[in-house]
Image (cartoon, rainbow, N blue to C red):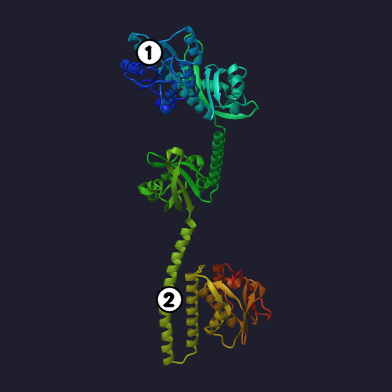
Amino acid sequence: MSNHTAGNLDVSGSVRVLHVDDDRDFAEMTAVFLERADDRFVVETATNASEGLSRLAERDVDCVVSDYEMPGADGIEFLEAVREDHPDLPFVLFTGKGSESIASEAISAGVTDYLRKGPSTERYELLANRVANAVEASRSRRLLAERTRRLETLISNLPGIVYRCRNDPEWPMETVEGEVERLTGYAGERLERGEVNWGEEVLHPDDREATWEAVQEELATDGTFEVTYRIVTADGETRWMWERGRVVDAPADGNRDVLEGFITDITEREKRERELERRADDLEARYRHLFEEAPVMAVAARTEDGRPVVEHCNRRFAETLGYDRADVVGTELGEFYTPDSRRKLMGGGYERALAGEFVREDRELVTADGDVVETLLRAVPRYEGRDGVVGTLALYVDVTERKALERQTSRLEEFASIVSHDLRNPLNVAQSRVELAREDCDSAHLDGVVRAHERIASLIDDLLTLARTGDVVDDLEAVDLATLVRRCWENAPTADAHLAVETEHSVRADRSRLRQLLGNLVRNSVEHGGTGVRITVGDLDDGFYVADDGPGIPPDERERVFEAGYSTSEGGTGFGLRIVEQVADAHGWTVDLVESDGGGARFEIRGVELVD
């Protein structure tokens, strides 16, 4: 068999001819005439069948020209030997001995052509013509076979169906190849014979009319079409198909156009797309729910002529500003801003949000009644499919109360500064004047003035503590209660009181604030417990207590002792226990007043984080 492949099948290329004749001179002369007759020819010679077979084994040959009468093996025997390995190789029997029986035998053996030798040079031209025709025909057959093989290979490997049919609502199939049975459950032959009708039995009933109309509309445009539809397989399964086709023949007899095309199964793709659509719908529903139920005011704005227009707003936004939602949607967002905030919006704030910058700024909104709502704005860009950024999503946190508290705190800090400086200085002057007065005279009234000054100093200290520390705790650390209690005892005017430390706890707390709490409780017991009062600090399962054996506090007054300014002592400021409660609240603790085992007061601090 020739080693030619489709890649070098060129009917216009060189033609390699092997001429076998036992007359060497005749063979060489024939070669000269052949090469003169057709400049494509390249002729080699051999003098017998054996030598000819050897040449065929060594190189490719496009055609063999052989004599009939040769020593060893005649031309027919040589032809039969060639056909064993080269069944399609052109073989021309060129012999001086001709008869009907030889011609018949040659044809039976598979000869390509038969030609008798002659004295005229025209005979060589005829031989050249016969050889050229035989080679070109052979090459054309091989090229066609190769193309057919490639097409069959392509069709067999296509994930679908290749068809030819009439452009008719029933889509009668003339030919159908590929994965027909795998996709439809029907054998291709049944479709070709008309036993199964594509348009009536395969195409899904609900898609027949729409598919026909879509195909006709697209064919009318440019003679091609592309459609997606469902089919019902032989076992009743519904599958999605994608089809592309075109008109390949428009019969002159008025019959329907002939279409050719390709059909493939896209069921899995359709399932994935529908699942993605379902998830997208689910996500959108969740987004809308979160948007609507957000604990802040929310607005989705769309850019129109460079300005943000409200496309959606949640209920909280409309209700906070006192509008019906229908009156908000479609309105420029800046219409709900104060003039100063509107300038910030259009002066760059909106553009920064569109550009992807995380905008976090103060904005003042205006209600329908003209009231101002102070908010903290957080804005990010909104994306919509392939359109990219279409606007912004803005969230407004109502900070009106917080801002009011900040202003109140600022005023309180200003008050504390005044108390600390403007009151302490005159008090210090007054205390100094009392000392000078004692040098000039000895009056019992001066003792009362000193006590009044001391009370004023205590009030100033407690007021500053309340104003400056508030409900804030700094770094928490492990604090040993026993050690801290003893230090508070050393710094307190304990007179003849007694301290019993029965705690082994270490607690996580702000050390300085805890010192305030313990110091105030110890001073409270000393001031109200009477002569020789015993103060005990002990452990609870979730905290600690400070108790005394003094006269105690009546049950109906125990809730009032934590009120600012309340005191049962003539010299008390009424702020000490308020500070205790404040420190406990700042840590997240609770403080309760109960009766102690000795009948006095017992302050229990619970909810404390204990440290092993």
Q: Residue flagged by tag 2: what amino acid is it?
A: Leu
The mark that comes first in sequence, 1 or 2, is 1
In this figure, which residue is indicated by the disc labeled 1? 127
Residue count near mark 2 (Cα–Cα under 10 Å), binned few <14, some 14–19, many ≥20: some
Query: Please, is residue 5 above or below residue 485 in the view?
Result: above
Picture coordinates of residue 20 (x, y %)? 40, 19
Q: Which label is found at residue 423?
A: 2
Quarter of the figure with residue 8: top left
Query: Please, is residue 164 above or below residue 455 in the view?
Result: above
Picture coordinates of residue 517 (x, y %)? 55, 75
> From where the camera sits, is residue 489 visible?
yes
Query: Please, is residue 125 above or below residue 210 in the view?
Result: above
Q: Residue flagged by tag 1: what amino acid is it?
A: Leu
Picture coordinates of residue 572 (x, y %)? 55, 79
Split into 4 quadrants, where in the image is the C terminus? bottom right
> What is the spatial separation of the Cα atoms under label 1 and label 2, in whole angstroms?
136 Å
> From where the camera sits, is residue 565 visible?
no
Picture coordinates of residue 604 (x, y %)? 63, 73
Residue shown at 41% from the left, 19% from the top: 64
Q: Nearer the viewer, residue 240 or 12?
A: 12
Residue count near mark 1 (Cα–Cα under 10 Å), binned few <14, some 14–19, many ≥20: many
